[in-house]
Image (cartoon, grey):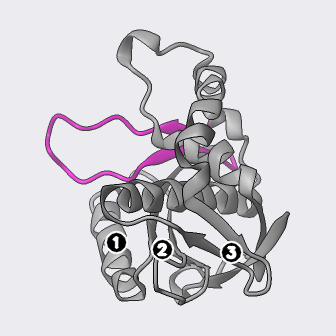
Amino acid sequence: MSIKVEIIKGDTCNELKVPKALGVFKEDIFNYGIFHYEIPPDKLSDSNFEYLESKIPAYVGMYEDYIDFDLSRQSIKSKTSGESAKNLSEIVGIALGLKSAIQIFGLNKKEIENIPISTKKEKRLDYKSTYNGSEIHIETKGTTRKSNVKTMIHDIHAKKAGKESITHKYGFVTLFDGLNKNDGTKIYVKIGR
């Protein structure tokens, strides 16, 4: 069972070829959302991706019952509230943001890495990979509240400031339906070079 999620490209990334929609399967939420999990320092190795893949069954077990796909509305719907909804929003945002980035930039899923937390307490984007021979940084966010989208986009802009050495910086904000909220599912692509 899959749905087509609308992608809305911001005017800050006019140079990108962005599809109008992203095909999403329920399994994608877990297969890409697993990047939410930060690998413990003693488990870091050249096979980080394989380590993350080994944790996907746990993610499915924890979150599968909290997500519905509405085929008629082509939408993802959260079936939870509170702290579980917050975690689910992050996971859905990561999943759809990274899947979009992989499709748009042709990234290799196995080469995506978390950007380490800085000791300087500066803002940072979430993930990095390689695109056209240079580093790309990606920020992902998810929400069930349409009113949060603009704030999240501003936060992404703040995180990219001061990173002039990185040529490619992009943000993806995923809006999906929450309990008693029916704004539809959309992916906003923002921020250019």
Asked if 97 appears above or below 149 in the picture, the reply is above
Looking at numbered disc 3 in the image, what kind of residue is underneath it? Leu
Q: Is residue 162 visible?
A: yes
Indicate yes or no whether the magenta region holds residue 120: yes
Q: Is residue 169 visible?
A: no
Disc 3 is placed on an element classified as loop
Asked if 117 appears above or below 142 in the picture, the reply is above
Tell me the CA gap for discs 2 and 1: 7 Å
Disc 1 is placed on an element classified as helix
Specify the quadrant of the image occupied by residue 56.
top right
* Left or right of 132 in this view: 94: left
Is the stretch drawn in magenta largely helix, strand or loop? Answer: loop
Residue 44, x across and y down, in percent = 47, 16
* Left or right of 119 in this view: 181: right
Lower sequence index among marks 2 and 1: 1
- Other residues around mark 1 within 10 Å, as few (<14) / some (14–19) / many (≥20): some
Looking at numbered disc 2 in the image, what kind of residue is underneath it? Ile
- 2 and 1 marks in contact (CB < 8 Å): yes
- 3 and 1 marks in contact (CB < 8 Å): no
- Other residues around mark 3 within 10 Å, as few (<14) / some (14–19) / many (≥20): few
Residue annotated with mark 2: 191
Looking at the image, which is closer to me, 110 or 191? 110
